[in-house]
Every structure is written in structure tokens, then in C-alpha cells.
Image: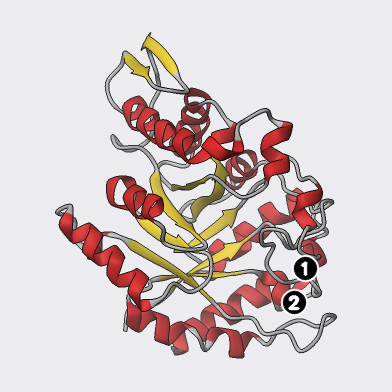
Amino acid sequence: MTRPRMLMILTENGTTSGGNDLPTLVRWARCAEDAGFDAVMASEHVVLGPDAGANGIMGNPRAYALPGNQDPFTPWPNSIVLLSAIASVTEALRLVAGAILAPLRHPLLLARELGTLDLVSEGRLVVQPTVSWSRDEYAALSVPFDRRGRILDEQLDVLRRCWGPSPVSFQGEFFQFDDVYFEPKAYRPDGPRLWFGGQRLHASVLRRLVEYGHGFHPLGAPSDEDLQTLRTGLAASGRSPDELELIGGVRAVFPDDRSCADLGQAMSAIPAQVEQGYTTFCLKPSQFIDDGARIGAFCAEVMRRVDSI
């Protein structure tokens, strides 16, 4: 069995880190690297509106923030800036900019931000571009919510062009420019690694994975049928399914709305996922500890359990 790679989720840890204490999250990342974690991840929102909690706020604040279940006061720092700070204090840790809300940025600005962080970190950046779910957020930034998928597709095309030779031109429905010189580029000739995911493997996600993807990071557990559809789509395009990193997670079960989950029980979900081909596993510290001072010992315990799998 391949040794699982562990990824620490840094955002959504308000019950343990205080939420707004970003220097603490930077220190957590260093603890994760020292313990042997493979990666850290920060997700983002620009703003939240009333639709953030439209389905009712989660009972246990340690649970994952999902569409419609979160307090609009939930802190979401800029993930690119936060990961830049982490890059400066780590050496090998991968930096996952999860849930980058690409349609809320111009693609040239996004390429500049991502390319710079990728160069600073010497190729450790992983990006998960997504369209997200909040109509209120799109309205606040004057971006058409119902066209966000088509916007993302143009942006991915622009990003690919930016990683190639200058000058760069593009004529699309949403973005148009001629003969711009994009320098410097990214660490690799084809740019940062790209993950795609979502609540289900619909046709647009599959197409982006096949054309651009280096990893599949679903929200929740995809069905066996979805995984087979993914393998078939990759094979049809001439790509080996082995090229694609599969990202899974632990299964935290809370005994009540006030308590943390049991780490051992949650990590027991890993071996079955490894058998399915998953190699990287997300874990959010606040689901298992309330005392941030214990983060170093917690990371060591996670890796001890990994070594025993």
C-alpha cells in the first residue's frame, strides 16, 4: 500500500485558531511540514452574503463549511497572500490554493498572482479554480453568476497562453486583449498544478479535468460510477488515469454539536480510499482538537497513525 500523503486544511479552523489570527496559521503550516505532512490548503471567499447561511448554519462549528450552511461572519482570508507567507517559512510543503474563485478576477491578474507565488515557492503551488456557489458574492462583485462556468473556461485558456511564449493575445466572449507580454511566467513551463472538483462530476468538471487537470478533489465521496467515468474520459483523450492525483479525506464524526471528533475513527476511512487509488488526504485540525497549542503534537500523532496504516 502506498504511504498516504496528508494535507492540512488551514482555513475553517476558527474554533482552534481564532479565525483571524493568520500568523498562527503560518506557524501551523511549519508544524505540518516538520511532522511530515505533504501539503497545506487555504480556500477563499471575497465576501459572503445572506445566502451563506440560507440552509441553516451548521450545528457543530467544527464541521466543513458547505454551500448555504455557514455564518456570513466566517473569516475567509485571501488564500494567495496567506500561502505566500507560508512559502517563505517552508521548503518542501505543497501550497494548495483550494477553491480559487477564478471568475471574480481578470485572468491576466490571476495569472500574475499565481505565477508569482509559484516562482516564490519554486513550483510548490497547486491551484483549484472553481466557480463556487454564492449568488450574493457574484452580485457584490458585478460578475454574472449564470455565466460563471463559461467565464472560467475562458480563464483557463488565458492561463495556459500566459504560461507559454509572449506576446499573448486572446479574443473571447468575456476577455479580449492583443500582444501583451507576460513576464515572468511560472516555475514550470506549463504553470502550477491544477486540481478540479465539486459536489458532483458533471460534464464541465470532467472536461476541465481531462484538458487541464493534474488532480481530482471532489467535495464528498464520488460514486464508483463517477470514478469510472473519469477514467474513461482520461483514456479517451489519450491520458493515463495514473496521471491524475486523487484527493480524498478523513471522515470526522461528531458525538454532539459541542465536541471534537475522534481522530482514529476518522482516519480509519483512509485504507479503503487508498485501495480505490486515492493518494492524498485532507484533514482539518479543528475537527479533532480545540487547543491550538497542541498543533505540533497533533501533527505528529497524525503521521504516527499514517505510518501504522
Residue drawn 75% across the image and 41% down it: 47
Q: Residue 160 carries which label?
A: none
Q: Are marks 2 and 1 in contact (CB under 8 Å)?
A: yes
Q: Residue 289 has which mark?
A: 2
Above or below — where is 17 with respect to 308?
Answer: above
Name the residue: 38% across, 73% down.
Answer: 278
* Residue at the image position 59 percent from the left and 40 percent from the top: 80
Q: Where is residue 159 in the image (x, y as percent from the top left)?
A: 39, 31
Who is closer to the viewer here, 50 or 186? 50
Which element type, helix, strand or loop, lies under badge 1?
helix
Around disc 1, counting alpha carbons within 10 Å, would you say few (fewer than 14), some (14 to 19), or many (20 or more)?
some
Pinpoint residue 116: horizontal percent, then vertical percent. 49, 31
Residue at the spot of label 1: 292
Tell me if 25 is positioned left or right of 196 in this view: right
The residue at 72%/59% (across/down) is 68
Q: Is mark 2 on a helix, strand or loop?
A: loop
Amino acid type at image mark 1: Gly
Task: Say what amino acid the circle numbered 2 marks.
Answer: Ile
In the rendered view, tell whether residue 274 sits above or below residue 166: below
Q: In which quarter of the image is residue 79?
A: top right
Q: Nearer the viewer, residue 23 or 18?
A: 18
